[in-house]
């Protein structure tokens, strides 16, 4: 069959009509009878958003498509922003090559926001490579992945009747967050489908620090996820003034941590390392009470120095010469544990203080 030109306009009704018509044609020609098909122009308009496609599906595939969606809010009230994409599927039907380039700006999906997005895909349906660059209020990410749609029909290249499953690996990655810059240590397996998401343990490093995460989700709303943090230096939270006054001190996370440092007293400095474990399990339902949360934070041994200002009376000792001395707090151990069950929190914290300045007077504080 030859589809010369198909044009749909409108918003919700137009989108439903377009999906029904295109789905009918594709099911009949591609999945149902495995017939060849060709169309010279396929246009789907929903508000200002438009999808164009043309080409043929036969023994030799040659399809091209372009998406111009500058107003995603016309597709759903939960969406906003703009998305542009173009690509092609070409080659033998048994294993056509896929190329895709997509860019997005100011994308909002529910409570999530992506300021900028760049996606590139190249390879066959069963084996391709993806490069993703993304910036959001949480930070920036640059990722490289490799994988394929394992459930695709290898003989025809057609979509299966069951939901597609993408199997692959996260090969490399860089994260820039308020907690510093992180590099992926080793490749980690991923499995994505409409009914299941599985993420094997992946570990990210920042100097001597390591952050490892893993998780699983399925369409019954069951969620299991955990994370561990080790060797994270508390000196990352030192204020800019304390860093500049420390000879030989370098901190590659300075710019990333600026938002956190601005909430701390000027001149504050910390010494020690943090270790943490967190886990979440339960069912993702409309009420979050079903989720069980566990957290443990261990600061080991360390100390904090806080310098007072005119508005922080009692925080530091004033020398009487206009230069307050830092107030030192030393601890041998500091541990916080928290858990939530049935929407009730249980907290436990303990700090073992060790103040050297008081020890010289014969006073012990614990």
Image (cartoon, rainbow, N blue to C red):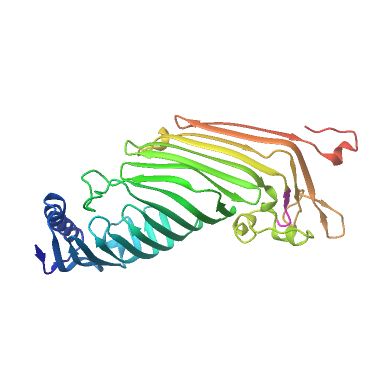
Which quarter of the rendering shows the C terminus? top right
Q: Position of residue 131 (x, y in %)?
A: 43, 60
Which quarter of the rendering shows the N terminus? bottom left
Return the residue nearer the eye: 227 or 301: 227
Residues in magenta, as a range: 266-270
- Where residue 6 sits, quadrant-wise, is bottom left
Q: Position of residue 344 (x, y in %)?
A: 49, 31
Please tell me whether residue 5 is drawn above or below residue 352 in the rendered image: below
Please tell me whether residue 36 is drawn above or below residue 364 in the rendered image: below
Q: Is residue 355 left or right of residue 276?
A: right
318 magenta-colored: no
Q: Position of residue 349 (x, y in %)?
A: 64, 33
Residue at x 65% of width, y 42% of height? 274
- Where residue 25 sits, quadrant-wise, is bottom left
Which residue in the rendered view is the most extreme toward the right? Answer: 361
267 magenta-colored: yes
């Amino acid at each position: 069959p030859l589809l010369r030109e198909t044009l749909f306009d409108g918003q919700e009704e137009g989108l439903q009509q377009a999906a029904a018509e295109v789905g009918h044609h594709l099911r009949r020609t591609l999945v149902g009878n495995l017939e060849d098909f060709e169309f010279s122009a396929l246009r789907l308009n929903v508000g200002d958003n438009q999808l164009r496609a043309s080409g043929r599906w036969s023994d030799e595939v040659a399809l091209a498509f372009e998406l111009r969606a500058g107003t995603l809010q016309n597709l759903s009230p939960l969406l906003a922003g703009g998305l542009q994409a173009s690509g092609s599927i070409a080659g033998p039907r048994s294993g056509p090559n896929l190329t895709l380039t997509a860019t997005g700006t100011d994308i909002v999906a529910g409570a999530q926001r992506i300021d900028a997005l760049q996606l590139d895909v190249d390879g066959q349906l069963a084996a391709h490579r993806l490069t993703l660059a993304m910036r959001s209020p949480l930070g920036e990410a640059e990722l490289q992945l490799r994988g394929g749609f394992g459930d695709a029909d290898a003989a025809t290249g057609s979509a299966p009747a069951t939901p597609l499953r993408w199997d692959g690996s996260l090969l490399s990655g860089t994260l820039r967050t308020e907690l510093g810059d992180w590099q992926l240590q080793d490749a980690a397996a991923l499995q994505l489908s409409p009914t299941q998401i599985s993420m094997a343990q992946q570990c990210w490093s920042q100097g001597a620090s390591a952050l490892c995460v893993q998780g699983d989700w399925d369409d019954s709303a069951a969620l299991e996820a955990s994370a561990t943090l080790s060797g994270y230096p508390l000196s990352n939270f030192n204020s800019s003034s304390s860093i500049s006054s420390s000879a030989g001190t370098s901190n590659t996370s300075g710019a990333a941590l600026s938002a956190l440092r601005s909430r701390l007293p000027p001149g504050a400095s910390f010494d020690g390392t943090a270790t943490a474990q967190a886990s979440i399990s339960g069912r993702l339902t409309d009420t979050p009470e079903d989720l069980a949360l566990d957290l443990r934070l261990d600061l080991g041994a360390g100390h904090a120095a806080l310098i007072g200002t005119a508005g922080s009376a009692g925080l530091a000792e004033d020398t009487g010469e206009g230069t307050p001395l830092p107030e030192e707090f030393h601890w041998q151990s500091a541990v916080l544990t928290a858990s939530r069950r049935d929407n009730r929190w249980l907290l436990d914290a303990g700090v073992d203080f060790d103040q050297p300045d008081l020890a010289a007077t014969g006073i012990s504080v614990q």
